[in-house]
Amino acid sequence: MDVILWRKETIKGQTTFIDLFVTLPDDDKWNDESMNEMKTKKFRKNNKKSSESRELGNEIFAANNWSDAMECYNESLRFAEVGTENVALAYFFRSACFFKLNMIDEALADIELATKEKIPDHLLPELEQRKQECLELVEVVRREPEHPPELDYEANKHYPCLVNKVDIKCNQQFGRHLIANSDIPKGKTILLEEAFAVSHIQDSSICYTCYRATFSNFLACEQCTNVVYCSLECKKRNKTHEWECGTFFGMRCFNDVEKQKNLHRTRLIIQTVLTAISTFRNVEALMRFVETLVRGDGGDPDKLPTSLDDQFSKYHFFFKLKKRMRRKPLSDLKRVYTCILFLPKIRDMFDTLEKKRFLMHLVVCHTIIVDSNVMEFEEGLTVRNVFSMFNHCEPNVKVNTSGKLTYCTTTRPVKKGEQLFINYLSPDEMKLPKEKRQEQFRYNWGFECKCEKCA
């Protein structure tokens, strides 16, 4: 990958960014099978498909397999045409699953949702009876509310997802890293951060905003069949789905395993670009902001923002993450760029040569950032901001995830002035021979670890 980002040229008196793909064939019609899928109607609402999923759910429910039945009712909800009784029927039968699973609050919520929709009159008595049974049981079987993890100390005044006992430092030996400014005992939560972007490969019964994998009163996207939200709040919070709605980028699961592998990282990159676009009121504002960052804050192109209190500063932080150029075919980079231009709303926004060239550089820049900072977890890939400041070595911090949330806890006492480390490799990867492990470090992160365990 030989690219020079953010260099400009003059074309017919107009200054614009250079064409990074000028040496490649001028072919914007990418005819890959997955792109053709975007042109199909498979993502539109379909009551026939909704009814088939509901009927399958009823068969599974009759076999007392309520969890699997609920998955079918969730699928029925996703395909149900807005304003039809299929929506109400999905809520009606899903409430029965919640009732059987003793999830009474959720059952009552679905009963309320079904009541607001076009529930058939002949089902109203059964729905009312279920509601009364729930009300009788609600105090008996009500579960203790889940308590989300919390920081064990006051928040850092600049980066509130981090505790005030930890600072971000930078030097030539370690680059950016995290240092304890006070002694920290074992078992203390020191970081609690929502990921900047996630690409999840689970099924569609997972919230597309917070990525919590749990049974919930999911609400379906009203335009496509790909996406559900665990609450109205999450539905309102999501700022990126509108750009990809109705395309395969909104999906988390493909039947073809190879297609999953090929598109998984691409989806993560596109998520970061869509997040950037949705942060600003228009393309021009985004262009001005990025050009300011490229020029450098106070002459320092790597300077991090001094706070993380809004979406602008979070994007600023992401843009300043480590960028390590890796050999990558230009054709792969152009494919990502072509993918995102294929989204109709994006194509309408970036409608001039100047804007298209800017988007070209932005996509490549984001690709480099993602490749340099991506972390894999069991269900997919993620890029986090402050979390990316952790270096790899013999770990003194354990990483936990809950949906889109990451929280890190000390696994042993950490002394003042000591660096905080995590393990970049999975338990299985740590069992590989030394040279294989070092090969992973060199290729993925550009270093060799010399700690006792890795060496």
Image: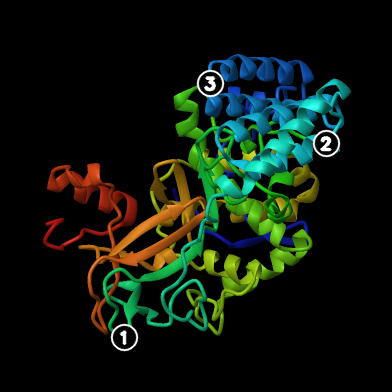
| Residue drawn at point x = 31 percent, y = 60 percent | 398
Q: Horizontal and vertical percent for residue 282?
A: 78, 60
Q: Does residue 353 appear to the left or right of 320 in the view shown?
A: right
Q: Horizontal and vertical percent for residue 262?
A: 48, 33
- The numbered mark, 1 or 3, whose residue comes first in the sequence reads 3
Q: CA distance from mark 1 to mark 3?
A: 55 Å
Q: Categorize mark 3 by other alpha carbons within 10 Å: few (<14), some (14-19), many (20+).
A: few
Contact flag, marks 2 and 3 (Cβ < 8 Å): no
| Residue drawn at point x = 45 percent, y = 25 percent | 257
Q: Does residue 169 appear to the left or right of 93 in the view shown?
A: left
Per the rendering, the mark at residue 115 is 2
Frontmost of labels 1 and 2 is 2
Work out whether residue 395 or residue 439 is closer to the camera in this orientation and state it: 395
- The numbered mark, 2 or 3, whose residue comes first in the sequence reads 3
Q: Does residue 169 appear to the left or right of 125 in the view shown?
A: left
Q: Horizontal and vertical percent for residue 109?
A: 71, 43
In this picture, is 205 found above or below 143? Answer: above
Q: Categorize mark 1 by other alpha carbons within 10 Å: few (<14), some (14-19), many (20+).
A: some
Q: Secondary structure at mark 3?
A: loop
Q: Does residue 143 appear to the left or right of 359 in the view shown?
A: left
Frontmost of labels 1 and 3 is 3
Q: Secondary structure at mark 2?
A: helix
The image quadrant of residue 279 is bottom right
Q: Which residue is mark 1?
A: 182
Work out whether residue 356 or residue 173 is closer to the camera in this orientation and state it: 173
Per the rendering, the mark at residue 64 is 3
Q: CA distance from mark 1 to mark 2?
A: 56 Å
Q: Horizontal and vertical percent for residue 117?
A: 84, 34
The image quadrant of residue 233 is bottom right
